[in-house]
Image: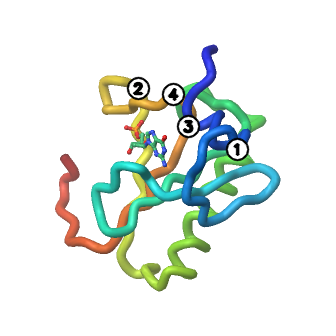
Amino acid sequence: MSETIFQKIIDKELPADIVYEDESCLAFKDINPVAPIHILIIPKKRIEKISDSNTEDKELLGHLFLVAGNIARDLGIEDAFRLVVNNGAGAQQTVFHLHVHLIAGREFNWPPG
Ligand code: DGP
């Protein structure tokens, strides 16, 4: 597995606008936002994509969603935000280190594009 840009952000080799960090995850602003609020929540453990996760990741995956909810509450957007996980190139995943997009601050449509 080659190192991804997100690993460099975890290792502080590349700057990022970090909004939350703990021992197992990191949250930072997306460099190419698709909404006024666009934050990426990533595990520090390298998991390429959600379909590569397994039972031992259960707590970690739950933690990412709890952190997303906490960030949303902190930002006052708890009533209108979307969490997106792109899995695989065919679903527009471009960085192969699992990440949850937290998107808010604009009108949403359904189904998503
Ligand atoms: P995805 O398409 O689901 O793999 O989303 C990858 C996201 O990562 C995309 O919205 C842009 C963002 N991104 C890529 N490189 C960087 C970077 O160097 N810094 C930050 N903050 N975000 C990045």
Residue lying at the far right in this picture: please name it: 23
Q: In the figure, is residue 82 to the left or right of 44?
A: left
Residue type highlighted by circle 4: Phe
Q: Secondary structure at mark 1?
A: loop
Residue 69 lies in quadrant: bottom right
Q: Is residue 19 above or below residue 23?
A: below
Residue designated by label 1: 12
Q: Can see residue 44?
A: no
Quadrant occupied by the N terminus: top right
Query: Label 1 crowding class (10 Å Cα cut-off): few <14, some 14-19, many 20+?
Result: few
Q: Is residue 43 above or below residue 23?
A: above
**Mark 2 or mark 1: which is in front?**
1
Q: Secondary structure at mark 2?
A: loop
In depth, the one of 42 and 108 nearer the eye is: 42
Residue designated by label 4: 96
Q: Which mark is residue 88?
A: 2
Q: Residue at x 51, y 74 (%)?
A: 72
Q: CA distance from mark 4 to mark 2?
A: 8 Å
Residue designated by label 3: 98
